[in-house]
Structures are given as structure tokens and as C-alpha cells.
Amino acid sequence: MKLIKACNNFIILLVEKYNGRFWYIVLFYGAPSVHMRASGFLDLEQWIDTCKLPFLIVGDFNQVDYQCDKLSASQQPIEGAEEFNLWKLRNELVDIPFKGPRFTWCNNRKGEKRVYERLDKAMGSKDWLSLFPDMGLKHYPIQISDHAPIEVDLNLTCMAGKRPFKLDAWALDFEECLEKKAEWNAKWDDFDRQLEHGINLACNGGGEEEYTRVNEELQAYTADAEKFWKQRAKIKWTVGGIPIQNSSLIG
């Protein structure tokens, strides 16, 4: 990949496909306020007007497209939605179809103050979709953050598989990390299933109790794991003679 442009709202990277075809990926972040968000869309549109290659835009747009992409006690019109959809039409952008829970963001409040929205999405130019006809977008359940992870898969047939387990390089020094790989995979898969079930219940009028319960269990699990691994890291680095204050792992 090659960095082409970086600004407050987006980063543009040039990507080379295996067969020698080039295309762009745009990592986008929409500003929280409608006024500032419109400015970011306009800046990107100016780049699109000059773009000669296929491109994909993915990220947190901070903008709901349609009423069905928002769940809340309020039924007020969605601010900025009309302008956003006109922007997509004007630039001939095609939404990437997704699998998984509909909503990718929650304000984590309770009762009637809770809001779900689909803010994280991907869209591509027509020639990009022609380049990757089997691609798709996967929504994972909302976990630690208020946003859900999303994954663009260039081969839709591979999406049915489990999310790959990844370790940072530092973890390779800990035999315990490798030993616990299967346990962590199973635990996170279980949390994923329960969270998705809880969100589906809440979205269909079944209440938010199940989602809240599982989310609190996940928060406790990750907090305990963080404490354990910080302590293990301190022991490891003390034995190895590495100053703790020079490491980004220890907060």
C-alpha cells in the first residue's frame, strides 16, 4: 500500500491487486456535527471527481441513511440523511451489502434513552464492485467499544468462517498466550453469539436486558484479563531487564 492523502476526515491508500490491477481504499471518519460532516463529504467528493481508478470507502460515517437504520424511542427525522443520500447518488457510490447485526453503534444508555444506529459502513465505485464481484461486509456485535467491528471480505464465500485469531508480536514471548488461544477463541465466539442474540431481541421489542447482561459480563471478563496480563508482563519484563515505563503495554 502507498499513502496518497491524509486529512482530518479521511486517509487514501493505493492498493495493488495480485493481478497487477490498482485501486484505492479510503478510510473515512465523519465528524459528529452535521455541518462539519458535510465539509468532509465535500472534500472527498473533490477527490472522487479526479479519481481514475476503482475505489472503496469504508469507516465510521457518523451518519444514518434511512429511518430503518436507527432504533430509538424518538421518531424524529434523521438530520443530514437527505444530503448524505444525495451525495452518494451524485458520486455514483454503491452500498456494500452486509451480514450480521443491523446496527453498528449504541450510545450504551438504558431504557428509552438507548439508541442503536448503523454508522459504520462501506461503499464502492461501480468499477470497484466489478473488480471484486464476490465481496461482502460483515458486521460483528457491539463489544467493548460503543461501535461494532466491521470487516470487508473480498471473497464472500470465505465469510462463513470464524474470525481469525491474531496475536501481537509481543505476545509470542508468552507461552501462556499460545496455550490459551483455543480458550480465548471459544470465549469470544460465545460472547459474539450472545451479544448478537441480545441485540436482535432488543431490536424486535424484546427489551435490552439480555444485551446489557452479556455486555456487562464481557466488560468484567476483559477487565480481569487485562489485569492478569499486565501483571504477567511486569514479571516478564522485570526478569528480562526491560524498564516497565518504556513499554506502551503498561498503562
Image (tube, grey):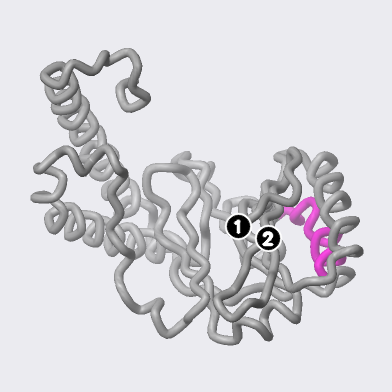
Left or right: 46, with 57 as reference point: right
Residue name at image x 69 percent, y 77 percent: 128
Q: Position of residue 145 (x, y in %)?
A: 44, 42
Marks 2 & 1, CB-CB < 8 Å contact: yes
Residue wearing tag 2: 14
| Amino acid found under the numbered disc labelled 1 | Met
Q: Earlier in the sequence, mark 2 or mark 1?
A: 1
Q: Position of residue 159 (x, y in %)?
A: 40, 77
The span shown in magenta is: 76-88
Between residues 96 and 193, which one lies in front from this camera angle?
A: 96
Residue name at image x 62 percent, y 68 percent: 16
Residue name at image x 48 percent, y 80 percent: 155
Between residues 204 and 223, which one lies in front from this camera angle?
A: 223
Could you tell me what secondary structure mostly forms the magenta stretch? helix
Q: Is residue 174 above or below residue 65?
A: above
The CA span between labels 2 and 1 is: 5 Å
Judge whether residue 52 is colored magenta: no
Q: Is residue 241 above or below residue 224?
A: above
Residue name at image x 52 percent, y 68 percent: 152
Q: Which label was assigned to residue 1? A: 1
Q: Position of residue 52 (x, y in %)?
A: 84, 71
Task: Characterize the local packing of mark 1: few (<14), some (14-19) or many (20 or more) Cα atoms within 10 angstroms.
Answer: few
Judge whether residue 87 is colored magenta: yes
